Amino acid sequence: MLTGNQLSPVEAKKIGLITDSFKKSEFFESIQSVADQMSRRIPIAVEGIKLAVHDGLEACFRHALSIEMEQTIRCFDNPLTQRALSGYGEIIKDKVEVPKERRIHIKEVVGMLQSETFFDQIEEKR
């Protein structure tokens, strides 16, 4: 920005400044395709992702993780999400070998997040 150098669409995509570029003649068709894809997403999940990213950028690491957890829990409480996960669970059963390890319960996760040392341990590893 300070030098005023312009990037080509390819360069901008390469450094992550943009996600894609379109020819002028393909613009509306391409944007409609993205809009169609987004319209098939579960609205509460899209809202939660936006909120977690937006508010998480303004928060400390610990608070950002709690925002993400809150949004995840909101999604799991939604009937559309539950129906989608049920269908996804069937796909996983057919295609993925699940390890025989003990599974952690959501109450254990919440307990870990509420412990005073959990986030300190994460910060130490960073």
Image (cartoon, rainbow, N blue to C red):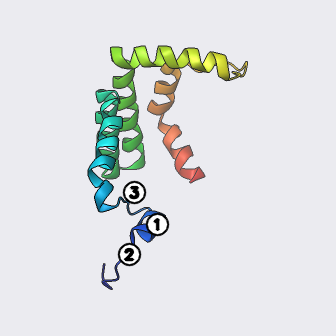
Residue 20, how many percent across, how many down? 40, 57
Residue 91, how many percent across, how many down? 58, 19
Q: Badge 2: few (under 14), some or many (20 or more) residues near its Cα, within 10 Å?
A: few
Q: Badge 3: few (under 14), some or many (20 or more) residues near its Cα, within 10 Å?
A: few
Tags 1 and 2 in contact by the CB under 8 Å rule? Answer: yes
Q: Badge 1: few (under 14), some or many (20 or more) residues near its Cα, within 10 Å?
A: few
* Amino acid, disc 2: Leu
Q: Is residue 54 visible?
A: no
Which numbered circle lies on residue 20? 3
Disc 2 designates what residue? 7
Residue 89, how many percent across, how many down? 55, 17
Give the SS element for disc 2. Answer: loop
Q: Is residue 74 visible?
A: yes
Q: Is residue 48 above or below residue 14?
A: above
Mark 3 / mark 1, whichever is N-terminal: 1
Disc 1 designates what residue? 15
Mark 1 / mark 2, whichever is N-terminal: 2
Q: Quadrant of the C terminus?
A: bottom right
